Amino acid sequence: MAVVDLVMPKMGESIMEATILKWHKNPGDPVKMDETVLEIATDKVDSEVPSTAEGIIDEILFEADAVVPVGAVIARIKTDATASAVDQPAPATPAAAPTTNVQVVETATAAPAKVENSGTKNNFYSPLVLKIASEEGISMSELENIPGSGNEGRVTKKDILQYVEAKRNGQTTAKPAAQPATQAVQATPLSQPVATTTSSPAQYSGGNVEIIEMDRMRRLIADHMVKSKHTSPHVTSFTEADVTNLVLWREKVKNEFAKRENEKITFTPLFVEAIVRCIKKYPFINSSIDGNNIIVKKDINIGMATALPSGNLIVPVIKNADQLNLVGLTKKVNGLANDARNGKLRPDDTQGGTFTLTNVGTFGSLMGTPIINQPQVAILAVGAIKKRPVVIETEQGDSIAIRHMMYLSMSYDHRIVDGALGATFLTAVAKELENFDPNREF
């Protein structure tokens, strides 16, 4: 009889714990490889956790609403379906987070908060619930009066989001806040977002306005962007590339490529391919900072900024992009983009990035000044490809021709990437694109 441990997955370099939302399986239930076992939530994303083995659920070590450290054993699966059931032991001590070849910069957050000054029986709130309360301007006194549907009457994510919706629609009569939400959150282990909600709304002199409250994901994005600016001194370099050969090649092969590989080839895998080649030449671009140490990453994991239907942004990661050929890159890019837009990304799909590419040209922009995706040290933006008259230098003399031109821009952390390295790397990427072989086979 073999028993496989199912552990809380790692969901990002700054994520060290997650809240269990719902179990899809109970002890004694059969489970298949990659079948969803439970749903979890962090401050960034809700995700499903698949089974890592096929067998029967033997033990569930944490109940719904529990806040569990990354790497802790949350369930055990018997791989021998005929094995008899055994008594469940007491929950195991959470295991340490699994080690990786990427050093984690941030430390783990403290244990789940317990509000000692609450006189009610429901005085446990997970970090996720407290985070939502802070973002929605809900005071601790309001929080204590929200009915909980979780274990022992605990307030779950669903409960507080329903309360928020009812409050916006004027359908709740909870007690008025005894103090601003920002003061209540100061007693919790969660760090307060830089862009917080004030205790009283801003006053507008004009009446012809529409006030739209940010959703949670937009607030988190805003928080991450502000933190990145506070963390890294940003410098942005610009260049342009003549991508005529690349454009004409893609136009020539796209129908055959789709027929043979059942995939649409976009420019993104071609851009990723060029970036990977240049990272191998300039490895400091593929690094991060830990105190006074520079952590140079040996793996090349390219994040690709992807717009969601809601207008928000998420960055799935192409792992070991240097080990994929063009067909492999195309399939990976298309798969991650589709999963992102359909809400099917797994926790592992958004972690471990070492360099990020963003295509601002998708929406018509010629260029942009992207913000670094921490803890990386650089992000490259590609603009829209436009036909322009360009001076062509030849041995026979100069001439003017219509060429497909594209601007590239890269923001980088000036603490370790100086202008010389930043500009040299960016120019190298542009040259890779310009020197694309128009007779290339795929």
Image (spheres, grey):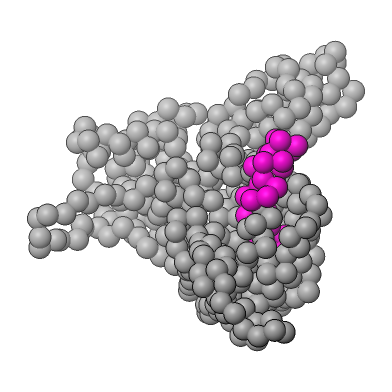
Vertical relation: 136 (above or below) 294: above
| Residue 24 as seen in the image, left or right of residue 205 | right
Task: Give whichever of 69, 362 is nearer the camera.
Answer: 362
Q: Can you tell which quarter of the image residue 167 is in?
A: top left
Count the marks: 0
Q: Can you tell which quarter of the image residue 285 is in?
A: bottom right
Residue at the far right: name it.
1
- Asked whether 254 falls inside the magenta stretch, the response is yes
- Asked whether 414 falls inside the magenta stretch, the response is no
Residue 91 position within the rendered picture, expressed as x and y whole percent measured from the top left: 69, 34
Residue 114 position within the rendered picture, expressed as x and y whole percent measured from the top left: 47, 46
Q: Residue at x 76, y 33 (%)?
A: 52
Q: Residue at x 72, y 50 (%)?
A: 329
Task: Give whichever of 323, 438 is nearer the camera.
Answer: 438
Q: Residue at x 19, y 61 (%)?
A: 202
Residue at the far front: name it.
396
| Residue 73 as seen in the image, left or right of residue 323 | left
Of the 4 image quadrants, the one containing the N terminus is top right
Span shown in magenta: 251-275
Vertical relation: 164 (above or below) 352: above
Judged by its main secondary structure, the magenta piece is helix
Residue 301 position within the rendered picture, expressed as x and y whole percent measured from the top left: 71, 58
Vertical relation: 6 (above or below) 380: above
Q: Residue at x 50, y 29 (%)?
A: 151
The answer to whether residue 351 is visible is no
Task: Give whichever of 105, 435 is nearer the camera.
Answer: 435
The answer to whether residue 343 is visible is yes
Vertical relation: 200 (above or below) 226: above
Task: Give whichever of 394, 19 is nearer the camera.
Answer: 394
Q: Can you tell which quarter of the image residue 66 is in?
A: top right
Residue 77 position within the rendered picture, expressed as x and y whole percent measured from the top left: 77, 27
